Amino acid sequence: RDINGIFISHLHADHVSDIYTLRYAIYTAQRDGYMKPPLPIYMPKSPKKTFKFIKDAIKKEFAITEISESLNLKLDGMTVSFKKTDHPLDTYAMRFECPAIKTGKGSLNKTVVYTADTGYFDGLVSFSRNADILIADATLQSPDMELENLGHMTAEQAGQLAKEADANKLILTHIWPEYDKNTSMGEAKKFFQKSVEIAKRGLEITL
Ligand SMILES: [Zn+2]
Ligand SMILES: [Zn+2]
C-alpha cells in the first residue's frame, strides 16, 4: 500500500519475477480501494518477447512507461535519468535527483544512483558523480576478474566507482549468494573509505 511506483532496470528473471505475485496483491488493494489503479511501472521494452509476456501478465494493475537514455522523468519535483549499462540485455542505471531544499547552510539537494546490473565502464563514473547514495552491482569478487564478459562488477570495482564518482555512501547489492559478504565489504573498502553497507531486504535509508 505504500508503493507509489516501481522501477525495473532490465527484464532478467531475477529482476522481474516478483511482479507476477505482486500483481495479485495490487489487484486486491485496488479492488478494495487501498491503492489507486494503475500503479506506475518503469521498465525497458526489450527483449520484446519478455516484455510482451510481462505486459500480458500484469494486465490492468500497472501502467507501463518505457525507459531509455532519452527519458527524463519528473516525479513530484524529483528528476530521474537513465544510462544504458554493460550487461547482456537492455539495462539501465538510474539517477534520482531530489529538488533542492533550503536549509540554514544554503540549499541542499540529494541524489541516489542505482547502477543496475553492469560491468565497470567509464561512463558510469560521470553518471554516478557526487551521489549521496550509490547502490552498486557487486555480484563478483576480485578473483572473478579472470572471467570474460562478466556483465557485473566486483565489489572492488564498486568501491572504485564510488571513489571515482566521489559518492558519499556506497551500498553493495546483487552479491552472489554463495559469497561471503564481509569479503565483498573488505574489497569495496580497499578503494572507498567512506560509509559502505550491504543491501538487504527492507533496508530504508534517510537522505
Ligand atoms: Zn541481469
Ligand atoms: Zn540481476
Image (tube, rainbow, N blue to C red):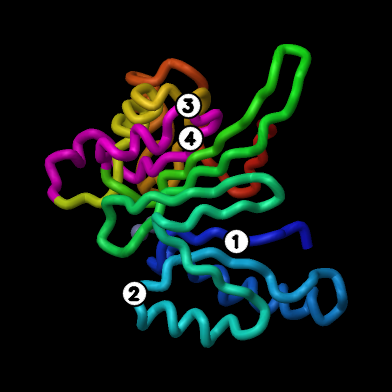
How many residues crowd around disc 2 within 10 Å: few (fewer than 14), some, or many (20 or more)?
A: few
Q: Secondary structure at mark 2?
A: loop
Question: Hey, which quadrant is residue 192 in on the image?
Answer: top left
Could you tell me the amino acid type at mark 3?
Answer: Asn
Q: CA distance from mark 4 to mark 2?
A: 27 Å
Residue found 48% across the figure and 35% down from its top: 134
The residue that disc 4 covers is 134
Q: Give the CA distance from mark 4 to mark 3.
A: 9 Å
Q: Which contiguous range is marked in magenta?
A: 120-148
Furthest-top residue in view? 105
Which residue type carries mark 1?
Answer: Ile
Which picture quadrant has residue 60?
Answer: bottom right
- Sequence-first tag of 4 and 2: 2
Q: Earlier in the sequence, mark 1 or mark 3?
A: 1
**What amino acid type should be assigned to the residue bearing mark 4?**
Leu
- Can residue 9 be seen here? The reply is yes
Q: Split into 4 quadrants, where in the image is the C terminus?
A: top right
Mark 2 or mark 3, whichever is nearer to me: 3
Q: Which residue is mark 3?
A: 130
Q: Mark 2 to mark 1: distance in Å?
A: 19 Å
* Number of residues whose C-alpha sits closer than 10 Å to that of mark 4, classed few (under 14), some (14–19) or many (20 or more): many
Amino acid of disc 2: Pro
Q: Secondary structure at mark 4?
A: strand
Residue at label 2?
A: 47
Instruction: State the quadrant of the N terminus.
Output: bottom right
Between residue 10 and residue 67, name the one nearer to us.
Answer: 67
Q: Relative to residue 22, is residue 90 drawn left or right? A: left
Residue projecting furthest to the right: 33
Residue at the spot 25% in from the left edge and 61% down from the top edge: 88
Could you classify mark 3 by the number of other residues whose Cα lies within 10 Å: few (under 14), some (14-19), or many (20 or more)? many
Q: Which residue is mark 1?
A: 6
